Amino acid sequence: MTPTEHFHPEIETMSAGDMRALQARRWQEQRAYLAAHSGFYRTKLGQALDRDLDLDALQDLPLTDKEELRASQEAAYPYGDYLTCPETKVVRLHRTSGTTGRSLILANSRADARIIAGQGARGMWASGLRPGDRVVHCLNYQMWTGGVTDHLTLEETGATVLPFGVGNTKRLIEVIRELGINVISSTPSYPALLKKVLREEFDLAPRDLGLRLALFGGEAGLDNPDFRRAMEDEWGFGVRNANFGLSEVMSTMGAQCEHGTDLHFLSDDVVFVELLDPGTGHRLPIREGTTGELVCTHLKKECQPLVRYRTRDVLTVTGTGRCACGRTSMRFRVSGRTDDMFNVRGINIFPSAIQKVLAAATELTTGHFRIRLQGPGPYDRVQIRAEAAAGLAEAGWATAARQLEARIRDVTGASAEIEIIPFEALPRTDGKTSLIERIPA
């Protein structure tokens, strides 16, 4: 194994025992820091942080959720009383989109920014980015962490980065061709818009751009082998889920290597992970086959450290041994989010399960769809609008809908009602695409 296969080899190939010892040392330092500087956790946890509280004892503490952070910020705007450093140390602010509630203000110190960039670089490096690559970064730079923060992680690898942002897709294509760009960083739904503009404005096929690697993040579905294979066949680039993370915790905590579609957790040295049973809240063992909600505790964070933060992401552990790439951290897939999960006649459904079925049915649909949920649920069936595949005649839409309904029932156990809509009827976007349309009752 050559050193160039890992960005931080001493961390990424560390044994489980050595990593646990490192985590234990860093948690004691972070615990003492929180006890001295966090008004939020002093109120929430009382004297618990004054004790020699070890990592196993964390499970006895209450969880922290996003609504608590929002309330803290409203009471002590803009940072909240969980800010644990002087305001003079804050060097960068971000603001979340607020799509699932009021926006959060995210503060980082210079030390935080260095950690975040290094963690992100591990992910981009694992996914195949190297010095000498020219990567165009097509995420929103306007306040959202995916823009500036991910740009800095790309730079940290030594690659050459073009900060393009979102919008003006025609100009993006021109720039890729003019500058010899060979890597793109974007949401996985963005290539569909690129493809449309390539066809309509340039009379070019996706492979004509000559991209060798696509670094994706921000949306689900990249562990779906059919979706991934179809995109790689069409574009000729390697598809990587390169930046799984959460703005409040760490912008990048996981990424795929070239040896599979599972994600490596790459932040064990700065984030302690628990997996909780979504029903009972009990801590689950991290071993192959375990599925649970991801809960994170910072081990090194200066501005806004969190203890037992509920991410709402549900993960399934797919491996804990050494990967062929040499990394020793757990490997996982994201099953969905607890706040996206909905119930159909007693069956819990994640949008990613629907996506997997439709992405595989390339003869019937493009794979672009929307789930329509009317009212709070539970629901009798899943209502879906799905695009017809290119070339599928309208006379065949009803048959296609019945076939897709049967496949969804076989996979999920839930009944579906599918409306086939014309090819490319759904908008293609350069940002995150929501798969659920919620309709008031």
Image (cartoon, grey):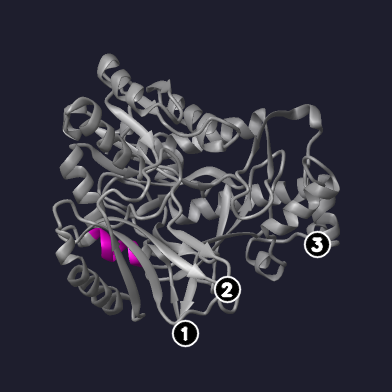
Q: Residue under circle 1? A: 346
**Residue 50 in sight from this viewpoint:** yes
Image: 215 above or below 353? above
Image: 122 above or below 416? above
Q: Residue under circle 3? A: 45
Q: Element at badge 3? A: helix
Q: Element at badge 2? A: loop
Q: Mark 1 to mark 3: distance in Å?
A: 36 Å
The image quarter in which residue 395 lies: bottom left
Between 297 and 310, the one lying in front of the other is: 310
Q: Residues within 10 Å of mark 1 (few under 14, many from 20)?
A: few
Quarter of the figure with the N terminus? top left
Which residue is pictured at 75% across the width and 28% down the height? 89
Contact, mark 2 vs mark 1 (Cβ under 8 Å):
no
**Relative to 329, 81 lies left or right:** right
Q: Residue 399, how many percent across, how many down?
A: 18, 72
Between 57 and 388, the one lying in front of the other is: 388
Contact, mark 1 vs mark 3 (Cβ under 8 Å):
no
Q: Amino acid at mark 3?
A: Leu
Q: Residue 20, how many percent across, how many down?
A: 54, 55
Residue 358 lies in the magenta stretch:
yes
Q: Amino acid at mark 2?
A: Pro
Which residue is pictured at 79% across the width and 27% down the height? 88
First of labels 3, 2 by sequence position: 3
How many numbered tags mark residues here? Answer: 3
Q: Range of the magenta residues?
A: 353-359
